[in-house]
Amino acid sequence: MRVFAVSDIHVDYAENLDWILSLDAREFSEDVLILAGDVTDKMPLLRQVFDSLVACFKAVLFVPGNHELWVQDEDFDCSLTKFDAITELCKFCGVHADIFEMPDISFVPLFSWYDFSFGEPDRYLRRAWRDFRACSWPDHLSGARDVSDYFLNLNLEKLSTMNKTVISYSHFLPRIDVMPERIPVERRNVYPVLGSEALGLQVKQLNPAIHVYGHSHVNQSVLLDDVCYVNNAFAYPRESRIARKQLHCIYES
């Protein structure tokens, strides 16, 4: 049994969708896939991807990204309502969005958002970052920190999960030092919306062998504090220099 990881497949791009639909069940029928968010904001397309992947892999594990929670073109009153609908879609399609157990290995999804603990967004980022327009939150969630806390609270009962091997996964970054030093300073203005230090504390408490994340589109595998952090974003078609554009095996038994 192999465990593969991928994120940020952005199947609104035809070439990305074609790649997903071309995966061969004969090659992956005994394997597990971690899909770490940012598939699409369109529910019918999300279902198409789920159906295709469930037919291909022994198990598909999913955590939503920020794109899934866009509601400006969807019939939802807010992003939390859509989050609940995605959870129900996962159940309907046979996609696992909660703790998934196999002999000697546990997979733990960690819901999350960004909370500006990686820095405050500047005026340009607040204008340009689409989440600020495409997501809608209920009145009791008055800002990104409240949204982050809401999702992190959903993880609390999972943090005591123990097994011979534990693999956790989130869409957002649990620590900013997973970003490579090679990133130019002028491109680091997006860091405030990449993740959350509080998510990192949850990963530390859970203490997995591997943590899979996405969102940054920068492929990375780095060992920090005895946890292997892996990003295997498929990314946008134009981003071939920072994304390997293939499934990545992170574990094999």
Image: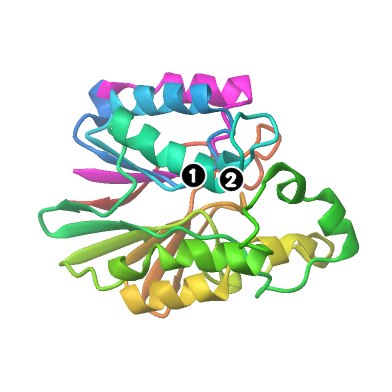
Residue 246 vs 232, above or below: the answer is above
Can residue 24 be spotted in the picture?
A: yes
Of the numbered discs in the image, which one, if any, rests on residue 79? 2
Label 2 residue SS: helix
- Label tally: 2
Q: How is the image coloured?
A: rainbow
How far separated are the C-alphas under marks 1 and 2? 6 Å
Q: Amino acid at mark 1?
A: Phe
Foreground pick, 157 / 57: 157
Residue lying at 53% horizontally and 69% vertically, measured from the top left: 149
Residue 205 vs 146, above or below: the answer is below
**Which residue range is magenta in the image?**
1-25
Q: Using residue 242 as the reference point, say whether residue 251 is left or right of it.
A: left
Q: Quadrant of residue 117?
A: bottom right
Q: Quadrant of residue 61?
A: top left
Foreground pick, 77 / 185: 77
Residue lying at 40% horizontally and 72% vertically, measured from the top left: 203
Q: Position of residue 233 (x, y in %)?
A: 54, 45
Mark 1 and mark 2 in contact? Answer it, CB < 8 Å. yes
Q: Residue furthest right?
A: 123
* Mark 1, residue position: 83
Can residue 247 be spotted in the picture?
A: no
In the rendered structure, does residue 197 fall within the stretch colored magenta? Answer: no
Disc 1: CA contacts within 10 A as few (<14), some (14-19) or many (>=20): some
Q: Position of residue 195 (x, y in %)?
A: 59, 64
Q: Amino acid at mark 2?
A: Ser
Q: Position of residue 249 (x, y in %)?
A: 34, 46
Of the numbered discs in the image, which one, if any, rests on residue 17? none
Label 1 residue SS: helix
Foreground pick, 11 / 97: 97
Residue lying at 44% horizontally and 21% vertically, measured from the top left: 48
